[in-house]
Every structure is written in C-alpha cells, then in structure tokens.
C-alpha cells in the first residue's frame, strides 16, 4: 500500500482557508496528536487507500492540526478527541463532525455525508442526491447507508417540497434498514407499517 503524501495536506488553518476559497471546496480538518493509536491506523490503512485519497483531495482541502498545539481552533470547535474530523465551509463554518478512527469504506461514506452536508446548505440538492446515490450503489450494506438514504430524501424534498419526496425514502429506510437510527426518525403521526404491508 502506498504511503500518505503529506505534501498535499495543509498544516496551517489560514493557509487552508485561503486554498478553500480559491478552490471553492470545503475543508476537511483532522486533529491528531502524538501516540494516537487511531491516527496511526488511519495513516497506515485509510489515507493510503486509492479511493479515499482520490475523493478526499477531489472534494476537500485537507488540513491536519495537532490538537494540543492548535488550542484556539480546538477551543472554537470544542475538539477533545483524536482522530477527529471537522468539515468547514470556505468561511470556516462547521457543517459536519465525527470522532474516531474510520477504515477506508467507512471513511468514504463519511466523506460523502460530509460533502452532502455542505452542499445541502448551499442548495446543491441535485449534487447531493447524485452523491448519495453513488454512495448507496457502492456501499449498500454499510452501517451508515441509511444515513445516506436519509440525506438523499432530505435533498429531494428540499428541491421539490413534495411530501412523497421525503416519505418514500423514509419508507425505504424502514424496509431496508429497520435497525438503523434513521428508521426510528419517521416524522409523521401515522404508522408506516400500513404502507409497508405489515
């Protein structure tokens, strides 16, 4: 497996923000520290993965900061764990956060969910739906597949304001991923079991 090319990563917040503004991309900030077992595993197994490397650098400006040395940014984001991931837009506004090690597949799913969070806020609903569909086709059995389907339904609803645009994906979640947290997020008073033939 190839090594991580750290020359492609920013190590200063202001430089990453400037690059993000120029590239019109969000920032993926990863906090690390010495002796962080999850960080070491991330660098050995996840970042060298070809799919991870391509999507990370195509969709984000990557920034890696030491959680102990970058106290101001750590305090602003209430960061306490390593590795931890924060997705910020070009103005530095937080759109997504997750703590802990992720293997290649899980990281690729999280990249999609993080990018979708930024794109949803920007009104790029078609792009969100396409990205979530791509994720669902690649990783249909991932534990976060229901989250991708939920985000796709959210974007579809926001683009049309049609009730079924969200209801249909919610029914699909309940049927395909009944043990997921998203399956418990049915927002209507009626029982979905009637529509599912249960």
Image: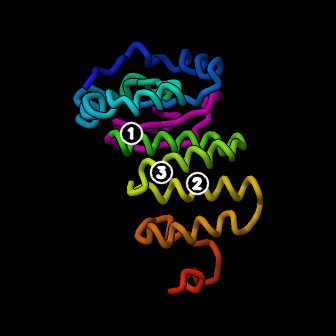
Q: Magenta part of the protein: which range? A: 74-103
Check residue 151 in the rendering and tell me which mark sits there, or answer none. 2
**Do the residues bearing badges 1 and 2 touch, measured as CB atoms within 8 Å?**
no
Q: Position of residue 119 (x, y in %)?
A: 64, 40
Q: Is residue 45 left or right of residue 135?
A: left
First-in-chain label (3 vs 1): 1
Pointer 3: residues within 10 angstroms few (<14), some, or many (20+)? few
Pointer 2: residues within 10 angstroms few (<14), some, or many (20+)? many
Q: Is residue 63 left or right of residue 118?
A: left
Q: Secondary structure at mark 2?
A: helix
Residue 48 showing in the rendered view:
yes
Q: Residue at x 52, y 46 (%)?
A: 134
Q: Splitting the image into 4 quarters, where does residue 106 fall? A: top left
First-in-chain label (1 vs 2): 1
First-in-chain label (2 vs 3): 3
Q: Position of residue 142 (x, y in %)?
A: 39, 54
Q: Is residue 81 left or right of residue 122?
A: left
Residue 101 showing in the rendered view:
no
Q: Residue at x 42, y 24 (%)?
A: 64
Camera-side mark, 1 or 2? 2
- Label 2, label 3: how far apart the Cα atoms are: 15 Å
Check residue 80 in the rendering and tell me which mark sits there, or answer none. 1
| Residue 95 vs residue 5, the one in the foreground | 5
**Residue 47 vertical position relative to residue 189 in the rendered view, above or below:** above
Residue placed under numbered mark 3 in the picture? 137
Q: Position of residue 76 (x, y in %)?
A: 53, 34
Q: Residue at x 48, y 39 (%)?
A: 111
Residue 83 forms part of the magenta stretch:
yes
């Amino acid at each position: 497996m190839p090594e991580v090319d750290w020359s492609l990563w920013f190590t200063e917040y202001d430089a990453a923000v400037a690059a993000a503004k120029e590239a019109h991309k969000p920032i993926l900030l990863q906090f690390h520290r010495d002796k962080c077992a999850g960080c070491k595993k991330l660098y050995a197994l996840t970042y060298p993965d070809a799919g991870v490397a391509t999507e990370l650098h195509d969709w984000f400006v990557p920034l890696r900061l030491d959680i102990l040395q970058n106290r101001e940014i750590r305090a602003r984001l209430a960061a306490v764990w390593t590795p931890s991931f924060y997705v910020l837009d070009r103005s530095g506004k937080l759109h997504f956060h997750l703590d802990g090690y992720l293997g290649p597949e899980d990281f690729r799913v999280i990249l999609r969910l993080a990018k979708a969070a930024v794109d949803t806020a920007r009104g790029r609903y078609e792009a969100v739906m396409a990205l979530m569909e791509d994720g669902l086709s690649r990783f249909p059995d991932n534990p976060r597949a229901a989250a991708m389907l939920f985000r796709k339904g959210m974007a579809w609803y926001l683009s049309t304001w049609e009730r079924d645009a969200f209801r249909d994906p919610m029914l699909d979640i309940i049927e395909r991923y009944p043990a997921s947290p998203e399956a418990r997020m049915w927002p209507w008073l009626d029982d979905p079991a009637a529509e599912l033939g249960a």
